[in-house]
Amino acid sequence: MISRECEQRRKSRVERLLKDSKLPLEKSLRNFDLKRLPVKAARQFRTLLEGGFLDRKENVLVFGNPGSGKSHLLSALAQELVVVGERKLHFSKCALLMQDLLAAKRDLRLSREIKRLGRYDGLIIDDLGYLQQSREDMEVVFTLLAERYERGSVLMTSNLPFSKWEAIFKDAMMTAAAIDRLVHHSVIIELNIPSYRVEHAKQKQQAENQADGAGGGPA
């Protein structure tokens, strides 16, 4: 009876944490094809599932082409950390996070918003650099990164390598400072693999072609 009640409480806690995380729950470990990962990336992913990087306030930076599975990888990782370890994580597209931070700055509550985000063990920022933003817009994101430095983990995806980040932050010094803070304590995962969506489309086309071929020629 007691064990059943404890399990029910735990289940309720996990459900609350998942709802609060804003994670795309459809991108789970169950439907993530680990076989597509490069050997090193797969090894890094298995280690990250242990969750120790959150305690060490380490960052996780995932780079790769569009469709390589960056967002799915971090979402699957975060969901496992929530379900198994009851860790507090929060997911946001970079553009949406920036809009929230800009609104907070306009309302003179930026420090309060950054403090609110600071209660999460890990903050997932998806698609850094996907959309072009002004320098002023990116300053609020930099402020967040600077405040989280050695205080909480940042998990980030980007299509752009560090060498092109000046195009994101629009300022050489701010770019260097952002990279320095993110890389100092970090795990860097490179997904140099083809787009899953492109591969899936090709497989679908091949299957349709084979089906047409099997049907024979015109009567």
Image (cartoon, grey):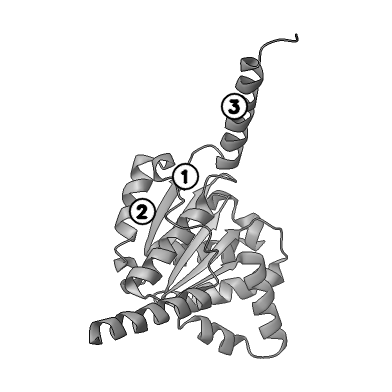
Q: Would you name the residue on which mark 1 appears?
A: 191
The residue tagged with tag 1: helix, strand or loop? strand
Q: Amino acid at mark 3?
A: Ala
Residue 52: mark in rendering = none
**Residue 182: where, in percent of width, then height?**
46, 64
Compare residues 88 and 2 and report the one nearer the observer: 2
Of tags 1 and 3, the one toward the viewer is 3
Q: Would you name the residue on which mark 2 appears?
A: 45
The residue tagged with tag 3: helix, strand or loop? helix
**Number of numbered callouts drawn:** 3
26 vs 217, left or right, is left
Question: Could you tell me which residue is drawn at 42 percent across and 54 percent down?
Answer: 30
**Residue 175: where, in percent of width, then height?**
57, 62
Quadrant where the C terminus is found in the figure? top right
Question: Could you tell me which residue is drawn at 48 percent across and 40 percent down?
Answer: 192
Q: Would you name the residue on which mark 3 appears?
A: 207
Q: CA distance from mark 2 to mark 1?
A: 12 Å
Residue 120 showing in the rendered view: yes
Compare residues 45 and 6 and report the one nearer the observer: 6
Question: Could you tell me which residue is drawn at 51 percent across and 86 percent down?
Answer: 115
Name which quarter of the figure residue 166 lies in: bottom right
Q: Earlier in the sequence, mark 1 or mark 3?
A: 1
The residue tagged with tag 2: helix, strand or loop? helix
Q: Earlier in the sequence, mark 2 or mark 1?
A: 2
Question: Could you tell me which residue is drawn at 51 percent across and 48 percent down?
Answer: 69
Compare residues 134 and 23 and report the one nearer the observer: 23
